[in-house]
Image (spheres, helix red, strand yellow):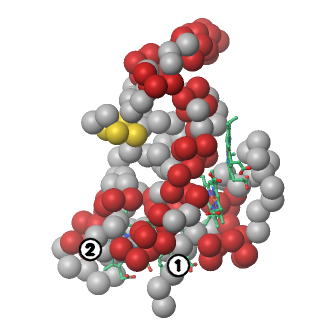
Amino acid sequence: MRTHLAVHAMLVAAAMVVPASAQEPTPPAPAAVAQAPAAPVADGYVWADGCKPCHGAIYEAWHETKHARTIARLSAADKEAACVGCHVTGPKQVVMDGGTHVNANVQCEGCHGPGKAHIEAATSGSAKPGNVVASPPQRLCESCHNDRSPHYRGFFFTALKGLVHKVPK
Ligand code: HEC
Ligand code: HEC
Ligand code: HEC
Ligand code: HEC
């Protein structure tokens, strides 16, 4: 473990000398090595664009919030550090797919859980497709909104829950 961490630290250090511009849109190659034993997988996630066709109004409302751009708060080096876990969706590290950082930001599935099974049920005609977290609980929010966040300024579930996006009546 110590060796792994040392290697990781070296790779992070190596990554940091690469100009930021050279790291976009894909992360530096050493990151893939540092994420041993395997590249992160995100089984069951479809990401926010997969929710948009059926929940367009909610998508638009969410897209206006800061949850839709949390990754922009982090430098390239921060994305390799302990920072990234609370600024992404699903696995607490960068997940790349076809050159795109698919789990960037706090997307729908960061609160409602992976949506693949839900969408399969919905597309096969179910009016109550289920397979999602209908009412994300306070402890879920507090897995990010806590004093391990360097910018923590308190969290008030009842007051803030209505701000994540409009909920249709
Ligand atoms: C093919 C259409 C479709 C897609 C795509 C879709 N949904 Fe749904 N969703 C539905 C339907 C139909 C319902 C049930 C009626 C309603 O509440 O709008 C629903 C309900 C929900 C509910 C409320 C669940 C409940 O039990 O009250 C949540 C939360 C939800 N969807 C989240 C998502 C998320 C997150 C995504 C993307 C990962 C997504 N949906 C993608 C069709 C879809
Ligand atoms: C930061 C967490 C968070 C994010 C991100 C988020 N939601 Fe929600 N969502 C909630 C909460 C909290 C509720 C309210 C549940 C309740 O009323 O108890 C909710 C409610 C819903 C509902 C309605 C459930 C119902 O019974 O009426 C749907 C559908 C839904 N969200 C879909 C989405 C979609 C689609 C996205 C992405 C475009 C998204 N949500 C992003 C937390 C989130
Ligand atoms: C995966 C981590 C994560 C989860 C889960 C999460 N948040 Fe957040 N939230 C963040 C981050 C990071 C920011 C800071 C966004 C910024 O300023 O860039 C934020 C910002 C917010 C904001 C300010 C949004 C704005 O547009 O001003 C509200 C409100 C909020 N969160 C409420 C919630 C609620 C309510 C829940 C649970 C239903 C929740 N969050 C779940 C990470 C999370
Ligand atoms: C435990 C989860 C968590 C970790 C770890 C985390 N953040 Fe955040 N970050 C948040 C949340 C939640 C917010 C929204 C502010 C709050 O805490 O209420 C936020 C907000 C921010 C903001 C917006 C500034 C502000 O005042 O709101 C920046 C910039 C940021 N984080 C950078 C970082 C960096 C850099 C690191 C690593 C050193 C980091 N974050 C680690 C959860 C986290």
Question: Horizontal and vertical percent for residue 74?
Answer: 60, 38
- Judge whether 81 appears above or below 120 on screen: above
Q: Which residue is drawn at the image coordinates 39% and 33% (left, top)?
A: 25
Residue 51 is left or right of residue 154, and the answer is: left
Q: Earlier in the sequence, mark 2 or mark 1?
A: 2
Q: Dot 1, how many residues are within 10 Å of its Cα: few (below 14), some (14-19), or many (20+)?
A: some
Residue 9 is left or right of residue 146, and the answer is: left
Q: Mark 2 or mark 1, which is nearer to you?
A: 1
| Residue 34 visible in this rendered orientation of the protein | no
User: What residue would you read off at disc 1?
Assistant: 166
Mark 2 residue's CB less than 8 Å from ligand 1 = yes
Q: Name which quarter of the figure residue 14 lies in.
A: top right
Q: Name which quarter of the figure residue 36 lies in.
A: top left
Of all residues shown, which one is farthest toward the bottom?
A: 169
- Judge whether 44 appears above or below 132 on screen: above
Q: Disc 1 marks which amino acid?
A: Lys
Q: Which residue is drawn at the image coordinates 33% and 55% (left, top)?
A: 46
User: What residue would you read off at disc 2?
Assistant: 122
| Quadrant of the drawing holding the N terminus | top right
What element does badge 2 sit on? helix
Q: Disc 2 marks which amino acid?
A: Ala
What numbered label is drawn on residue 124?
Answer: none
Q: Which residue is drawn at the image coordinates 28% and 70% (left, top)?
A: 53
Q: Which residue is drawn at the image coordinates 69% and 71% (left, top)?
A: 160
Question: Horizontal and vertical percent for residue 98?
Answer: 27, 36
45 or 69, nearer to the observer:
69
Mark 1 residue's CB less than 8 Å from ligand 2 = no
95 or 77, nearer to the observer:
77
Question: Horizontal and vertical percent for residue 72?
Answer: 55, 44
| Residue 163 visible in this rendered orientation of the protein | yes
